[in-house]
Image (cartoon, rainbow, N blue to C red):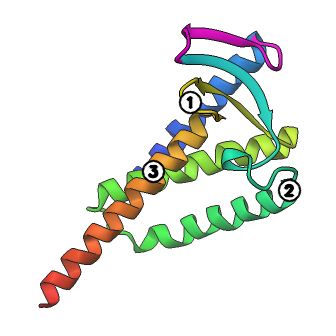
Amino acid sequence: MHIWVTLLVVLVLDRVSKLLVQSNMALYDSIAVIPHFFHLTYIQNPGAAFGILSGQKWLLIIISIIFLGALIYFQKFVPPEQKLIRICMGLVGGGGLGNLIDRLAYGQVIDFLDFKVWSYIFNVADSCLVVGGLLLAFLFLRLDKQVKAEKN
């Protein structure tokens, strides 16, 4: 349950934020929220994170579909009491689905979160993918250590 609720919340936040940016900003417009630190800058990214695989729209679509299929398949193996793992899976799934929708609808991903201390512009889906993925990796490593400790 936690996976699907989280996925839906991420998807709604991602879609609404992108719709607001598209509706209120022209491409390449930038609005200083905190000058010299955080701006809203509307761009379209034809690649994946950090601009990798730029122009590989169909490869990224196929990877996203395979990834989302794997999420659907493997979620049944995560016990319901592992709520944090399930929430992280929802973050990653919602982020992946949000960017997949962009690629299917526009051929590229809408990005707008622009921290000037970093040279990359990203979106809500990207944030959820990264945070969820890192937390998921940490939780799996911790779980693996617990299982090994219990065996000894």
Towards the viewer: 1 or 64: 64
- Per the image, label 2 sits on a secondary structure element best described as loop
Of the residues under marks 2 and 1, which one precedes in the sequence?
A: 1
Screen quadrant of the C terminus: bottom left
Q: Nearer the viewer, residue 92 or 77?
A: 92
Q: Amino acid at mark 3?
A: Gly
Q: From the viewer's perspective, is the residue at label 1 or at label 3 nearer? A: 3
Q: Which residue is mark 2?
A: 56
The x and y percentages for residue 118 are: 57, 32
- Residue at image coords 69%, 68%: 66
> What residue is at 48 percent from the left and 51 percent from the top?
90
Q: Which residues are magenta?
A: 25-37
Discs 2/3, front: 2
Asked whether residue 4 appears in the rendered view, the answer is: no
Residue occupying the point 59% across, 70% down: 70
In the image, residue 33 lies in the stretch drawn in magenta: yes
- Magenta stretch: includes residue 152: no
Please tell me whether residue 135 is drawn above or below residue 37 in the rendered image.
below
Count of numbered marks: 3
Residue picked out by circle 1: 13
The earlier-in-sequence mark between 2 and 3 is 2
User: Residue at label 3?
Assistant: 132
Between the C-alphas of marks 2 and 1, the distance is 26 Å
Image depth: mark 2 or mark 1 in front = 2
- Viewer-proximal residue, 106 or 29? 29
Q: Earlier in the sequence, mark 1 or mark 3?
A: 1
Q: Position of residue 73 (x, y in %)?
A: 55, 72
